[in-house]
Image (cartoon, rainbow, N blue to C red):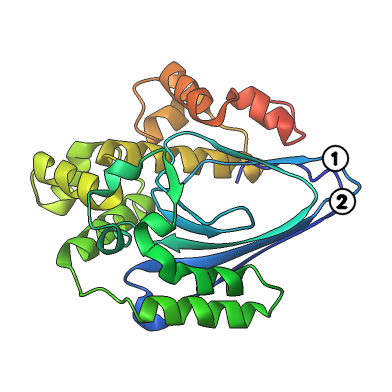
């Protein structure tokens, strides 16, 4: 999340784990409830991860493909959302087509799950307890649990390695780590993750920079560009602005700190 001060009102954001038998496909459930009645609207922004989400909210449940740009949402009034974050590769058996088709798209959820989704929709948008909502989501996917697919496991493992290993700065680095050819990697990511290996690497390195800002760090730009795998400082700053929508200096000011 790109941090902005809430103008007033209340917001609650929680995460819940799926049942253990669903973890090969589902990363976690997330729940947001905001009450901004009588307050100014709030713009919530995030730099998305390489994950697909199934989102339940009033007005229609949707599947959100991997968003390659900053995601922005205007929050106002009072509402609640229940989201399901799939692991990289985890949505492929439900979609039954290359998930790169969903990149930067939001489609009605019934196109994927049909009318069977309606009872779950009713529960997740009700005022029942969080635990009951999680149980309902678990039951829905347990009844539709896919067969194990080694390609899903591999795609998820490779994305995790990119996240956890800052030394992976280029696709060639990932090729060496994965022990597979570049074209095979690109096909795997297109089919199962939804974006290219290069995009995932670059996005996670930008996440590292945003976390440094959020923690109050003052970056050494030339050194940071080298650490994050950029050709030079200007390239890093331009990439940051193209994704976040603000230059690093502007983003620091939004956090309440001058660079």
Residue to which mark 2 is pinned: 37
Which residue is at a point 79% across and 46% down the rendered structure image? Answer: 6
> For the residue labelled by badge 2, is the local secondary structure a helix, a strand or a loop?
loop
**Is 176 situated left or right of 238 in this image?**
left
Q: Which residue lies furthest to the front in this view?
A: 115
Please identify the quarter of the rendering in which residue 183 is found: top left
**Is 56 situated left or right of 25 in this image?**
right
- Which quadrant is home to the C terminus? top right
Q: Nearer the viewer, residue 65 or 198?
A: 65
Which residue is at a point 20% across and 74% down the rendered structure image? Answer: 148
The residues bearing labels 1 and 2 have C-alpha atoms spaced at a distance of 8 Å
Which residue is at a point 61% across and 82% down the rendered structure image? Answer: 131
Q: Which residue lies furthest to the left in this view?
A: 181
Residue 72 visible in rendering: yes
Of the numbered discs in the image, which one, if any, rests on residue 207?
none
Residue 167 visible in rendering: no
**Image height of 251 relative to 110, above or below:** above
Question: Residue 34, image x and y in percent?
Answer: 75, 57
Which residue is at a point 28% across and 49% down the rendered structure image? Answer: 99
Q: How many labels does the image show?
A: 2
Residue to which mark 1 is pinned: 40
Q: Which of 88 and 80 is in front in this view?
A: 80
> For the residue labelled by badge 1, is the local secondary structure a helix, a strand or a loop?
loop
Question: Residue 73, image x and y in percent?
Answer: 63, 41
Question: Residue 20, image x and y in percent?
Answer: 39, 82
Q: Residue furthest top?
A: 234
**Image height of 213 relative to 155, above or below:** above
Question: Residue 208, image x and y in percent?
Answer: 48, 43
Circle 1 packing at 10 Å, graded few (<14), some (14-19), many (20+), is some
**Is 133 situated left or right of 242 in this image?**
right
């Amino acid at each position: 999340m790109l941090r902005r001060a809430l103008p007033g009102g209340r917001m609650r954001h929680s995460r819940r784990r799926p049942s253990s038998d669903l973890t090969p496909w589902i990363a976690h459930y997330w729940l947001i409830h905001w009450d901004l009645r009588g307050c100014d609207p709030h713009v919530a922004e995030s730099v998305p991860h390489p994950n697909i989400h199934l989102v339940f909210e009033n007005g229609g449940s949707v599947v959100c493909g991997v968003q390659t740009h900053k995601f922005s949402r205007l929050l106002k009034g009072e509402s609640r959302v229940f989201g399901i974050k799939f692991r990289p590769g985890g949505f492929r058996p439900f979609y039954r087509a290359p998930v790169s088709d969903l990149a930067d798209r939001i489609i009605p959820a019934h196109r994927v799950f049909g009318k069977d989704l309606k009872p779950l929709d009713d529960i997740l948008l009700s005022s029942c307890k969080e635990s009951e909502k999680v149980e309902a989501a678990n039951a829905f996917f347990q009844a539709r649990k896919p067969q194990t697919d080694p390609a899903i496991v591999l795609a998820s493992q490779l994305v995790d390695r990119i996240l956890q290993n800052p030394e992976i700065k280029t696709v060639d680095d990932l090729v060496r780590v994965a022990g597979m050819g570049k074209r095979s990697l690109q096909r795997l990511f297109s089919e199962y993750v939804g974006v290219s290996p290069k995009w995932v690497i670059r996005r996670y390195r930008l996440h590292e920079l945003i976390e440094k800002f959020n923690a109050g760090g003052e970056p050494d730009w030339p050194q940071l560009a080298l650490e994050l795998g950029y050709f030079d400082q200007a390239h890093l700053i331009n990439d940051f602005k193209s994704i976040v929508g603000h230059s690093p200096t502007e983003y620091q000011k939004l956090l309440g700190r001058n660079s």
